[in-house]
Image (spheres, rainbow, N blue to C red):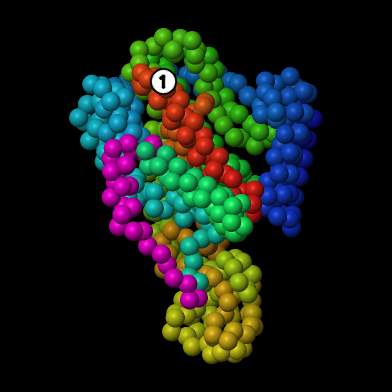
Amino acid sequence: MLFASFIVFAAFAVLYFIVNADIPGTWKFAIGIFEMFVVGQILIAKYSLKGEYGIIMLRTKKGLQIIRELAKSEKLWNFFADSGLVVSYGALSFFLMKKHITWKSAIVGFVVLIAISMFVVPFVLPFLAENIQGIMPAKSEGAAISKLSSFVLPIGLILLLGGGFFAVLLFSLLFYGVTVLYALISTFAFGTTAISQTSPGATLLLPGINLPFVEGILALVIILIVHEGAHAVLGRIAKVPILSSGIVLFGVIPVGAFVEPDEEFLKKVERTRQTRVLVAGSTANMFTSLVFFILFIGFLFVSMPYRETGLYVISGTVANGTIIHTINGMDAANFENITLGKNAEIVLGTNNGEITLKTNNEGKMGISFYVLEKSLLFAKFKDWYFGFIYMVLGLVFSLNFVIGSINLLPLPFFDGHRIMELNIKNQMIVKALMYVTIAGFVLNIVPHFFR
């Protein structure tokens, strides 16, 4: 046990060093992956744990009693799964479950579907863009802001109501995949730099690498508990024996959780009950996303007096992360009304002290920034514990939605693939969907290799 404690402590210490090292992000990612692989293999060999390639499965039966107690509310959980099927697949759910979707579960499902799409989804990608990639939508001096065309919105609404988040995500994945393919053709056929200027459409999420370390682990643990817990409860209701439950580690980092049902028994269960078991995980993620989004917004309002104000710098002549409070002694939030002058020396009052710089020939400071006072979503705090709560709540609501919706895709080992296999008689259609989705995923990842 002492050896295991030493390995875990050393692994986290090395990972912390890697994350804070002054090297490119891709190097951090690769070295972090290699370290967790080595640590995982050491623990597997030393303690004869079940796993391979650095991935460890830790089994326990301690959660089974909780699952049994929750499963006593059978009608409520079946209603939960049926509503979740509507959230996940929209009107398509009526074909997947045929007569088992009641008008009550349909109404609740569509209400939740619309609520998440209107209030949660618009904040998911902007929040993750800041906290995963270090980029947020910003006010760049002289930059224009593009708007969605009126053509895209009706298509999105049709996809949302007709196929739920499954259809919207699949369309987005394939649409951006075509964009990447066009960039690849342009680069290799015509010698342009299009692919190097194209952002990746998908990335792995790892605490300490592209997620805040402690906050990222807490968020992933919550996501995994609600996802696998919902599977387990609906499995129990379907009378499927649950052999064990546990967590999955990659090295020492939690990357998954599982319940271990009797798979052979599950395959013999009636199709409707199987579908409920399979969709329960994503349903739990979607509902959890909505609940934590409400908590996130509530926290932002309550913590308003403790937030930083001014301009939050993300790039340019001033260090990233600097908060500019004043410009030549005037409130930086009113920067649009401050005349700086061309090639003029200005003094910035920041959270890092005063900074003196010169404007360029256009009278610009040469920075991209975000006005903190004008943002509901993005917040920086004077006290670390407010920032910690903000980050945990934000990651839980955003990652629950991302992981829950991705799990609906018809990819091997995903619940979405098994739902399609179970409910679509023509397996050629299922295979076609799977291959097309795989191609879309690969294309979305390709830009990582050209950055």
Q: Secondary structure at mark 1?
A: helix
- The reply to whether residue 218 is visible in this rendering is no
Q: Position of residue 340 (x, y in %)?
A: 53, 87
* Disc 1: CA contacts within 10 A as few (<14), some (14-19) or many (>=20): few
Residue 159 visible in the picture: yes
Image height of 419 relative to 300, above or below: above
Q: Quadrant of the N terminus?
A: top right
Please report the residue visible at 74 percent of the width from the left and 19 percent of the height from the top.
48
Say left or right for 244 vs 81: right
Q: Please check the rendered image and state whether residue 303 is part of the magenta-colored stretch, yes or no.
A: no
411 or 375, which lies in front? 411
Q: Residue at x 74, y 58 (%)?
A: 22
Q: Residue 432 vs residue 83: left or right? A: right
**Nearer to the camera, 338 or 173:** 173
Q: Which residues are magenta?
A: 141-166
Q: Residue at x 33, y 18 (%)?
A: 272
Q: Is residue 143 magenta?
A: yes
For label 1, the residue is: 427
In the rendered image, residue 423, in percent from the top left (x then y), is placed at 36, 21
**In this orientation, which residue lies closer to the viewer: 79 or 74?**
79
Residue 128 percent coordinates (x, y): 51, 51
Task: Classify 304 as above or below 24.
Answer: below
